[in-house]
Amino acid sequence: MTNALEKVLYTAHSHTIGGRDGAGRTSDGALDVKLSTPGSGKPGTNPEQLFAVGWSACFIGAMKLAGQALKIRVPQDVAVDASVSLGKVDNDTAYALAAVLTVSLPGLEPEQAQQLVDRAHQTCPYSRATRGNIDVEIKLA
């Protein structure tokens, strides 16, 4: 399997300064955030929070596409709670991420919900990017 894109559908452009205690802004100005280190108490968000929100939104989109293919109606109030953890590995010399996505699909039978989640996890770009690289758990609420 190759990771090269055959067709680019969209490219996001951003400019970040100062790292975890800086700021980031997209080229179109739609996102303009102050950044802060987790647990610092300083105003701003952090990369783990941004990753959690991005993955959650993308995963919902992947479930909607899966629903069309599987002929399963995705509830309008579908939700994903994402927990992205930052930790150390390799005897405290390297950092790594771990994630838990908790998916809420109210009104669906558990079998249908699991079908959607399984298919979405195979097609969501965030899921594909993290597969085999970080510890990921996806569960139904």
Image: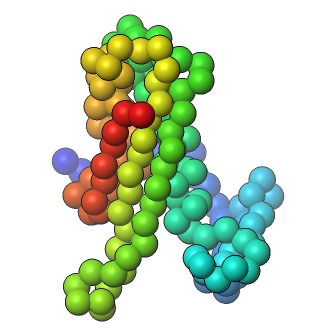
Camera-side residue of 87 and 8: 87
Q: Is residue 101 left or right of residue 32?
A: left
Can you say which quadrant of the picture contains the C terminus? Answer: top left
The x and y percentages for residue 60 are 50, 33
How did the renderer colour the structure?
Answer: rainbow
Is 72 above or below relative to 17?
above
Q: Is residue 101 left or right of residue 111?
A: right
The x and y percentages for residue 65 are 44, 23
The x and y percentages for residue 81 are 51, 44
Is 107 above or below relative to 103?
above
Q: Is residue 52 left or right of residue 27?
A: left
* Residue 100 visible in the snapshot: yes
- Residue farthest toward the left in the current orientation of the protein: 1
Q: How many marks on residues?
A: 0
The x and y percentages for residue 58 are 51, 41
- Residue farthest toward the top in the current orientation of the protein: 71
Which residue is found at the position 35% from the left and 63% from the top?
A: 98
Which residue is found at the position 57% from the left and 61% from the top?
A: 49
- Residue farthest toward the front in the current orientation of the protein: 141
Which residue is found at the position 45% from the left and 60% from the top?
A: 84
Camera-side residue of 78 and 67: 78
Is 90 above or below relative to 55?
below
* Residue 61 visible in the snapshot: no
Which residue is found at the position 59% from the left and 24% from the top?
A: 77
Task: Give residue 134's quadrant in the image.
Answer: bottom left
